[in-house]
Amino acid sequence: MPIIIASSNGSVGIDAGWEMLTRGGSALDAVEAATRLVEDNPDDHSVGYSGYPNLLGEVELDASIMDGSTLRAGAVGGLRGYRYALSVARRVMEELPHVLLVGEGAARFAAEIGMQPENLLTPEAEQTWRAGIEGHATLDWAGISELVAQLLKRSAQLTRDPEHATGTVNFIAQDAAGHIASAVSTSGWAWKYPGRLGDSSIIGAGNYADSRYGAAACTGWGEAAIRAGTARSVVLYLKAGYTLETACREAFGDLQPIMRGTPNAMSLVALDRHGNHCAFSTSEDRTYVYRTDGMASAVELPRLVV
Ligand code: GLY
């Protein structure tokens, strides 16, 4: 039975992803269609157009997609000037003998495949960026490490729901043939150091899918997911025979020494090959969304707190 799940900010795209699945589209088509609508959303400052920029005021996007049936993956990091980062990642997967393109190479590839260049920085996002760097006329090295650390804390507090401010969008779908695909797209943390890649473009960290077991995708403090290999861990725990919920708890257990004492949050959504789904967060009151057969629209559920 087809199913699609997402982080809560995926609610603007999940029904489009579901329609794709019901029309016989693949899990890959579903997660791409759904993600594009989030990348379009000007009210979501964590993804695509209107994403919060880096320390220098440049919007840099990270995204990845994984086909759980072939274990092919594509990703872009630090992509500037093109809003559909996830589609560019998919074309990397399908057209290049590579997995990850970054920076100028990613933008060059986006232009070559006919993506439309544009300015992604909206006046609202620019205003927030300026408020953060106020009083720091020159962003030279002296003191910059402290400034970045201060701003990352501020970034974590931009709104009550980090998925709408400093977060990321996750989609995982299973199509009628049982194929699982996962997609992650983000503008990363506001005021990040230029060139910083988060977990969203790192296969195994923020995104992993294997149709034989399941998939997981992360939002939150990307550095932690990179250090613990979180998305891949969930899938390996599934392979080891754990239930989906226990697999996620084990992966959060691996994160514990990294998370201890930080103000940052980590969250993930996960789906197993039987269509079971769940979502976890280190913060209270977080939700995720899902849609499957017999549902008129997507439903929002609370995440389990670890
Ligand atoms: N999880 C998104 C990021 O850290 O950029």
Image (tube, grey):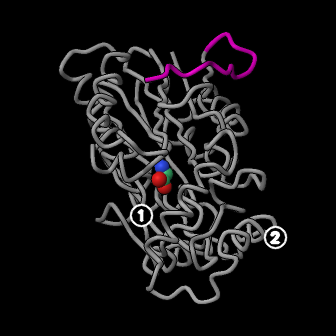
Rendered position, 3 above or below 160: above
N-term-proximal mark, 1 vs 2: 2
Pinpoint residue 271: horizontal percent, then vertical percent.
Answer: 43, 24
Residue at image position (61%, 76%) is: 58
Residue 86, image x, y percentages:
53, 55
Between 70 and 240, the one nearer to me in the picture: 240
What residue is shown with label 2?
123
Q: Quadrant of residue 275?
A: top left
Disc 1: which residue: 197
Q: Residues within 10 Å of mark 1 (few under 14, many from 20)?
A: many
Per the image, is 68 magenta? no
Name the residue: 37% across, 53% down. 223
The residue stretch that appears in magenta: 293-306
Of 178 and 182, nearer the camera is: 182
Instruction: Check mark 1 vs ligand 1: CB closer than 8 Å? yes or no.
Output: yes
Crowding at label 2, few (<14), some or many (≥20) Cα neighbours within 10 Å?
A: few
Q: Which mark is residue 185?
A: none
Disc 1 to disc 2, C-alpha distance: 24 Å
Residue 167 at x, y percent in the picture: 57, 48
Left-right relation of 288 to 176: right
Whether residue 127 is situated above or below residue 45 in the rendered picture: below
Residue closest to the far top: 294
- Callout 2 amino acid: Pro
Residue at image coords 60%, 27%: 288
User: How far from the left and from the top, in percent, is residue 254?
Assistant: 26, 33
Is 305 part of what is drawn in magenta?
yes
